[in-house]
Image: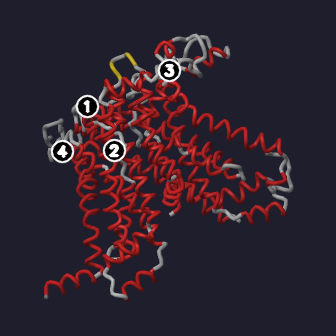
Amino acid sequence: MSNLSLLERFQSNRHALGYAFMVPAALLLIGLLAYPLGLGTWLGFTDAKIGRPGEWIGLENFSYLLTDSVFLLSVFNTLFYTIVASIFKFLLGLWLALLLNKNLPFQSFFRAVVLLPWIVPTALSAIAFWWLYDSQFSVLSWTLVKLGLIDTYIDFLGEPWLARMSVIIANVWRGIPFVAISLLAGLQTISPSYYEAASIDGATPWQQFRYITMPLLTPIIAVVMTFSVLFTFTDFQLIYVLTRGGPLNATHLMATLAFQRAIPGGSMGEGAAIATMMVPLLLAAIMFSYFGLQRRAWQQGADK
Amino acid sequence: MSKQNNNGMEFLTSLPRRWVTIYIPLILMLVILLFPFYWMGMTAFKPNEELLSKAGNPFWLINPTLAHFKKLLFNTSYPAWLLNTVIVSVCSTFISLFTSVLAAYAIERLRFKGAKVAGMVIFFAYLVPPSIIFIPLASIVYQYGLFDTRMALILTYPTFLVPFCTWLLMGYFRTIPFELEECAMIDGASRWQILTRIILPLAVPGLISAGIFAFTLSWNEFIYALTFVSSSEIKTVPVGVITELVEGDVYHWGALMAGALLGSLPVAFVYSFFVEYYVSGMTGSVKE
């Protein structure tokens, strides 16, 4: 009998029950998320190879990487990829959101269709891009040749800058739906009465966009773009499928380089060091996009 | 846009103007967003002779064929990959939902000491990207003898699913009035009864959103599946298509596209039934 009452007491104590309910999540997140995060940092300071635990070698991996031109190139590529792709995703996504927000027939159908690139497995849609970028059978080249704009087929993934732009286009294609649909949800929370009042006062469409839409949308833009930057910065699949980092490492991102060094290359320590070095850069990128945009919201709120 | 339009109300803008500023850009964007899928479909049904000839119009196909699908289903391990992907996605979705429901209920409703902190930790866990921790995870998976098993994927996928689902469900539970719980408590219901008889039935839309998200995210997962699994019969569809269908420099484009199409259909199918849940889940989690 006392056993039952103990159970009852346990069930009615919300603190005890709360901790009990947290156990599965805590086990999972500590064992398979927090612990690996710490282990990864530690591995970065060792010379671990696949199948062999490493020994502490201090900052050797990091000091080697800082002199490694391939690593430095991958840092540049990652920043370039993130910045350019995020800007285009934002501009095109915002534009698409504004277009979808007009009173259209079949609006929910459009919204459903627009999200397709986002929900389809990236690795699989990347294969479609691979085929579109093929050096011999690309339909893009075919069209351009037929239109008389070029004479020879373009080797989209064969030259460094062309390859960088090609993978960015594929990434933007995949990222637009997320930005557009999230911003559309934000736009729909803005009360139409603001626009009516502005029209009556004679505001132009541009003024309405600049002084009503933008200030009210900025907090959501900050969150959406922070996530977009996070996804882009840590992108792996698209590059792995399209170029594996080539040509001449021109499209290697830090994530793909870490994979290449650690798994096929076998140098777990070095790969982990690259992944660890992503963390401060990633935090800086997130801070920049989140607080940068938040500050603008505050200024816009303040200057009127 | 610079033209002065004093009466900015939309219904008064003329039809041709609406075409130039709205319909044409919208249609162009839709065409670009959907073209890769059209191209996937075209290629998947196109016979090899047509694929490799530069004569004729590549945008259309003359003799549709199922040869690529036949090759895919009977001469490769594709059916096994499909089955693996289904098993892994379904199992990790259920594990994540179970874990997230408990965690979200505890944080949002039991409000145990430290619940606020736990909520923050969950949010930060969501921000940890798989491409930063896959290397140490690989060594953990190896240590526990899980390397090259489905279990490795079933256990690691929840690490990115649980934070997201918990966050989403917390938002959902918040909308359920406290009074309902209080009434049940007065009637003598235990916390567990309240959770299973009152909260969960009311949170079904939230559960569906979280479930669809977890399912599509695990179906689409790539880096863990690429790293933790090496034998062909355990691979998932995205990894199998990328690593096994490409033989040297000979690309079987037809089969590759057929594989991509077949691998995309299940998520597209699930998604098409629950678009509204998906959109509300996505936008809801962003807005909070």
Q: Position of residue A143 (x, y in %)?
A: 62, 19
**Residue on which disc 2 sits:** B86
Q: Secondary structure at mark 3?
A: loop
Identify which amino acid the numbered label 1 is placed on.
Ser
Residue ID for mark 1: B232
Residue at the spot x=86%, y=55% of the render? B6
Q: Say which label, 2 or 3, has the lower sequence index.
A: 3
Q: CA distance from mark 4 to mark 2?
A: 19 Å
Q: Which residue is mark 4?
A: B146
Observer-side mark, 4 or 3, equals 3
Decide which of tag 4 and tag 3 comes sooner along the chain: 3
Which quadrant of the view contains residue A48?
top left
Q: Residues within 10 Å of mark 3 (few under 14, many from 20)?
A: many
Q: Are marks 4 and 2 in contact (CB under 8 Å)?
A: no
Q: Earlier in the sequence, mark 2 or mark 1?
A: 2
The answer to which image quadrant residue B193 occupies is bottom left
**Camera sees residue A250:** no
Q: From the viewer's perspective, is the residue at label 2 or at label 1 nearer? A: 2
Percent from the top left, x then y, of residue A224? 53, 53
- For the question of whether residue B120 can be seen, the reply is yes
Q: Mark 4 belongs to which subunit?
A: B
